[in-house]
Image (cartoon, grey):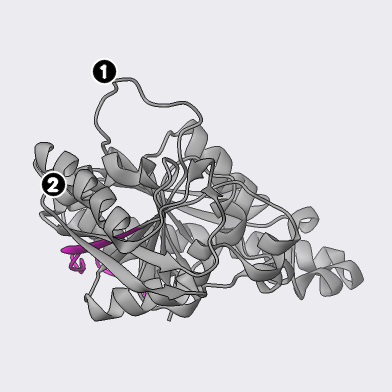
């Protein structure tokens, strides 16, 4: 099934969970841009956490609902000065499972998109349990936009966030096309070009269950991959024609190699301003063992990554 570019989605309610740290609020410039272009309403969310540490991402942890509300009030005033109205909500009950609380609030507030900062922290805990952002995607149904904070603070003269090119990875299967309506909506809001990328593995970069079969019959496996590349070109050509019929600026390319690494290289070289892709929401060891491309991208890609739950 090939999705028409005209089938956009509604992105009018943006939920932005924050923890009081400068790292988390680094998403605000992008939130302001999205809200303005999508004509969306923003809700800033702070969930009171049980047994909080003294600091969070190097900043003092907020204590008490009054302090959290004052923090959100200050942020919403700064956003209003930029022309964007932001509601604020402090969840007063101390929660041990912040990700679940975010998912619940996304449902209660009918959020169309959850926007979270991510960071490159590692260690056993991240591998075993997944980050809060991964958990929100895995346990919820709303799409999640992951934003990696810049390594250095942006200067006052820095240009506002803009989307000129969107990267949409596809694999030729209907579940991956769940990302297309979101790409259509964002490209329409910004007038952005859409770059469709289909990556076909090589024998050396095969993963999952296909590895064993390829080792037993390498010649047949190589021929199968060549056929897959031919089919991928037909698929992307069809996709481009349908998107062009909706008067969208779209290009497509088929490449060979490791999917995650290829996408990282394309995102850096094109360059792209946002990646929109479908994900099954795997987290932790599940993502490690499945070779999840989305999970591999989330920790390494510099551009904002919009993950849509695949059906």
Residue at image position (31%, 63%) is 65
Read off the residue under disc 1. 157
Q: CA distance from mark 1 to mark 2?
A: 19 Å
If the image is split into quadrants, where does the C terminus sit?
bottom left
At 43% from the left edge and 45% from the top edge, which residue is drawn? Answer: 21
Pointer 1 or 2: first along the chain: 2
Nearer-the-camera pick, 115 or 288? 115
Where 39 falls versus 139 (above or below)? Answer: above
Segment colored magenta: 1-17
- In the rendered image, the residue lying farthest to the right is 216
Q: Is residue 236 visible?
A: yes
Instruction: Look at the image and tell me in which quarter the N terminus lies.
Output: bottom left
Please state the horizontal and vertical placement of residue 155, each as a whole percent of the image.
Answer: 34, 20
Which residue corresponds to mark 2?
36
Q: Is residue 47 left or right of residue 286?
A: left
Q: Secondary structure at mark 1?
A: loop
């Amino acid at each position: 099934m090939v999705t028409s570019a005209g089938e956009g989605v509604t992105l009018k309610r943006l939920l932005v969970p924050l923890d009081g740290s400068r790292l988390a609020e680094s998403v605000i410039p992008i939130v302001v841009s999205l809200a303005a272009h999508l004509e969306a309403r923003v809700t800033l969310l702070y969930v009171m956490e049980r047994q909080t540490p003294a600091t969070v991402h190097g900043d003092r942890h907020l204590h008490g609902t009054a302090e959290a509300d004052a923090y959100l009030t200050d942020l919403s005033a700064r956003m209003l000065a930029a022309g964007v109205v932001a509601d604020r909500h402090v969840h007063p009950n101390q929660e041990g499972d912040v990700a679940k609380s975010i998912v619940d609030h996304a449902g209660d507030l009918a959020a169309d998109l959850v926007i979270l900062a991510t960071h490159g922290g590692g260690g056993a805990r991240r591998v075993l349990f997944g980050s809060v952002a991964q958990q929100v995607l895995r346990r919820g149904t709303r799409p999640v936009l992951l934003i990696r904070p810049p390594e250095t603070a942006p200067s006052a003269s820095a240009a506002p966030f803009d989307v000129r090119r969107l990267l949409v990875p596809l694999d030729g299967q209907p579940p991956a096309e769940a990302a297309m309506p979101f790409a259509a909506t964002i490209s329409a809001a910004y007038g952005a070009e859409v770059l469709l990328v289909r990556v076909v593995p090589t024998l050396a970069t095969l993963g999952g269950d296909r590895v064993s079969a390829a080792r037993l019959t390498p010649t047949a496996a190589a021929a199968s991959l060549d056929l897959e590349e031919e089919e991928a070109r037909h698929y992307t050509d069809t996709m481009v024609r349908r998107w062009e019929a909706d008067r969208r600026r779209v290009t497509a390319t088929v490449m060979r190699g490791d999917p995650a690494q290829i996408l990282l290289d394309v995102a850096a070289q094109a360059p792209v301003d946002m990646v929109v892709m479908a994900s099954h929401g795997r987290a932790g060891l599940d993502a490690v063992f499945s070779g999840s491309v989305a999970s591999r991208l989330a920790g390494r890609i510099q551009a904002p990554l919009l993950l849509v739950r695949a059906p």
